[in-house]
Image (cartoon, rainbow, N blue to C red):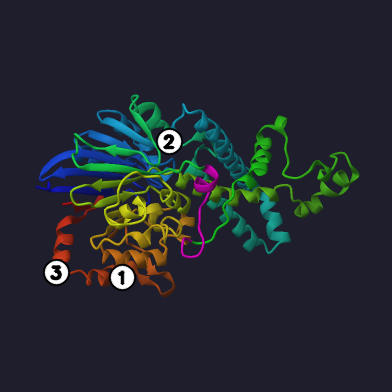
Amino acid sequence: MPKKISVTVRMYRMGTGDCFILKFFEGKKEKYKMMIDCGTWLGSKEKLTEYIQDLKAYVDNHIDVLVVTHEHKDHVYGFDVCRELLTKDFEIDRIWMGWTEDDKSAKVKKWQKDFGDKKKALAIATNELQLLINDPQYAETMKKEYDGKNSLSLRQGFVASLNQLNELHNDIKEGNYVGGLAGMKVVKDEIAKNNIDYLGPGDIIDMAPDLEGIKIYVLGPPQNWEKEINVQTGGKGESYDHNKELDEDDAFAAAVHAISNPDTFTQPFDAVFIADNNAAFTTELYDNPAEAWRKIDTEWLNAAGGMALRINSITNNLSLALAIEFEDSGKVMLFPGDAEYGSWASWHNIPWEVPCRNGKPHFTEDLLSRTVFYKVAHHLSHNGTAERLGMDMMTHPDLAAMATLDYTIISKPWKNTMPNSALLKDLLTKTKGRLMVMNEEGLYADPGNKVPLTDKLAEARKRMSKKERQDFEKNYLNRKLYLQYTVDLF
């Protein structure tokens, strides 16, 4: 006789970012506790303490496994800010991370060095641009020589956005680069006790004996840097088109590093174009205060914007992505972190040796077709969920979804792409309104026509049958500190 298995998913409402607790039940008996990430875009220790205290009480200060999907502030910030709460009187049996976090691997060390140099270059370039716009003489020049107020405002907005992308990836103190995110360091250096498992695509975790009949399939992060991790978008019908090449940033990164290390002086152009500092051109014209507005010394630093977006997408594609299968019912829960198109596409190339249950040509498509709970990748952004290789394959009539988006606590540039109206439309249709968003306030399902998301959710939920509506109301809790949904998997 099939066991009555259910999973209660609690999404903490700390602000845009992921912090989940999954409790696995057999009947009414609690069998297993999983924590996925602990992040938000912003929040003081005083504010976040309330959430972490509730989390610790809810799990009775013990987690069977902590999943850290990837190193972004909105996924690990809580480990830093609430360090004492999460490192004392809090027991974690195992920690799961993607293979890209294995510091002892030679392959990973080389990649971390190369990628780390680019993240550090982003921090240096951001700091240089911030110093520039803080210079009163520069501001006066912008106002005087260009359509000042508009030009200065645009430049200030650009640098503000760059600062936020910088903070998403780097530990910054007083404008200076300190290193990788402190939250990830806390997990690796203080929470971990030689209990980290580094997982890669194709790994299968049999949860027995703790959870009989439950398997976890690791989908990402991908193994191939150039063809999978380094890909943000696909063609029409796959995702939106964006340029996605990191190699072009190599020269830029080297030049930026030279700002703080003159011994490694490099410029993003050939030496023939560099004027002699003692030449008459330099002393009589270029250094003439009256001609200062014509200088382009720092213009090349604006390339940091493009590099920041590419670094962001690559880090998202490094997400540890998991599909949890319940063998008796065949139902699946999908937790992809913030995977973007390159990762989603790579899942369909994993050489699974597992038979499909729904007659699909590939086991990944089979898993997606049986998905009944989806943690929406990257806060409902335009590039966080693949269309043809993702959303289109989620066809189960019981599909429900949670999205970690909150306009009151968010990086301002993200509001340009979150939520994506086309993705929202598909989710509302496929879930019949079983879409639970961290904070619906200020969100529009159709931004152009200013149609509130709340209106579209109510409209979609009218399409539920009487039983579906009763089950949803029974299983869904909306509380100040969290949203909670119980998924019946029998």
Residue 91, position as x, y percentages in the image: 25, 29
Q: Is residue 86 above or below residue 141?
A: above
- Indicate yes or no whether the magenta region holds residue 230: yes
Give the mark toward the camera: 2 or 1.
2
N-terminal of the two: label 1 or label 3? 1
Disc 1 + disc 3, Cβ < 8 Å: no
Q: Secondary structure at mark 1?
A: helix
Q: Which mark is residue 331?
A: none
Q: Which mark is residue 99?
A: 2
Give the mark toward the camera: 2 or 3.
2
Q: Secondary structure at mark 2?
A: helix
Report crowding for label 3: few under 14, some 14 to 19, many 20 or more residues within 10 A (C-alpha): few
N-terminal of the two: label 2 or label 1? 2
Q: How many marks?
A: 3
Kindly give the residue lying farthest to the bottom in the view shown. Answer: 449
Which residue is denoted by mark 1 in the rendering? 456
**Identity, as a three-letter code, of the amino acid under mark 3:** Lys
Disc 2 + disc 1, Cβ < 8 Å: no
Image-based side of 152 in relation to 62, left or right: right
